[in-house]
Image (tube, rainbow, N blue to C red):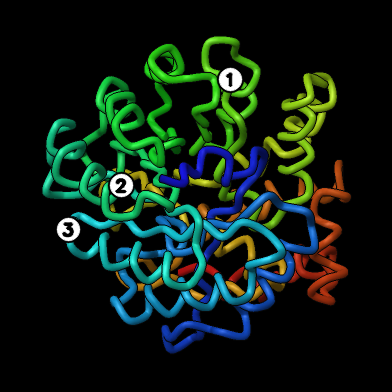
Amino acid sequence: MNTPKSIIPNGALTALVTPLLPNGEIYWGGLEKLVAFQASQGISGIVPVGTTGESSTLAEHEHNAVIRQTLKLGLGKLLVMPGCGSNNTKEAMHYVQVAAKNGAKAVLLVDCYYNGPSSLELRNEYYGPIAKAFPDVAIVPYIIPGRTGCALWPQDLAELNREFPNVCAVKEATGDLARMSHTRFLTSPEFQIFSGDDDKTLEMMCSNQIRACGVISVVSNIAPAAVQVMCTAALRGDFNSAVAMYEKLAPLFNIVTVLADRKVGNSSAVTDKFRNPLPIKTAMNALGMPAGPCRQPLGKMTPAGAQKVREALTEVWRKSPEVLLPIQGFFDVNIEQRLSDETLWRVLCY
């Protein structure tokens, strides 16, 4: 067996958005530009059609088409690790087959959402069969109980790694540092732990109990070079430089998910939770990048929510313009002008 233990590079991988046209169709020209931008900024890899890529609302033929196209565009320039997860093992198996046939050496599989299998079932009926069927493809479980309602336990992850060496990494988005430490304790030093939460990345990488190797990042859609710099500095033990870059990026980490209050008629206020990828697509559209709308039922942010995105972008642009400056050159836009354009921001929200 060809065990793909080191096929996934350490550092930052971008959880790539799927750009859409106003009519909701995939914007293929925009996808090409986004992949080229990521490659130009030295990112370690991209992860298309994951949660950020709106995989749950893409039809099967669209999901497969994005897998094929991103591999075609990215192979030889960066790692392309398609999201192939599902709440249906047969469907996930099909996506992995398409990815492998088109040159993928690694895939991301999210825990099965909604039907909520136990950790044992995830191990025996989902990850195990897929890892066995594709021994030359690195299988990366994605643990995010806040989205899926279930979670693969560290003990079962370690058992999978022992039985199937191609289960050689994990994307950890539980926010539970003790759990991550337990994963590190149960697995070999070579087993890769990627952060699935931008704001937790540096803490996970600096922890001797976790020793994360990088992040699968949402924020790197707009700041790939900066997120990569933070990760590479942490990997080489230059924690002062890593912390300095983290502080520059911090306002962006706070808009992966946005909470905003809203009045409904004469009743008391309610709080809307605008979840990924809506805030990052709002930011990308504001900056002039090809993102487009989200698929329904995701829609737009409220003015209060969009204002939080605007304030974060403005803070970064004022204090650390180098973080966003690559966008200006690559996409031929004027960031200062776009941040101050009231009409533009009104269009981006309800």
What is the crowding at mark 3: few (fewer than 14 residues within 10 Å), some, or many (at least 20)? Answer: few
The N terminus: image quadrant: top left
Q: Could you tell me if residue 333 is visible in this image? A: yes
Q: Position of residue 173 (x, y in %)?
A: 42, 35
- Amino acid type, residue under disc 3 in the picture: Asn
Residue 131, disc: 2
Q: Position of residue 206 (x, y in %)?
A: 65, 17
N-term-proximal mark, 2 vs 3 = 3
* Residue in the foreground of this view, choosing between 313 and 185: 185
Q: CA distance from mark 2 to mark 1?
A: 24 Å
- Amino acid type, residue under disc 2 in the picture: Ala
Q: Position of residue 169 (x, y in %)?
A: 46, 36
Q: Please report the residue visible at 43 percent of the width from the left and 70 percent of the height from the top.
A: 294
Q: CA distance from mark 1 to mark 3?
A: 32 Å
Q: Position of residue 342 (x, y in %)?
A: 69, 70
Quarter of the image for residue 100 reads bottom left
Residue picked out by circle 1: 211
Task: Point out the residue furthest to the bottom here.
Answer: 23
Q: Please report the residue visible at 34 percent of the width from the left and 73 percent of the height from the top.
A: 58
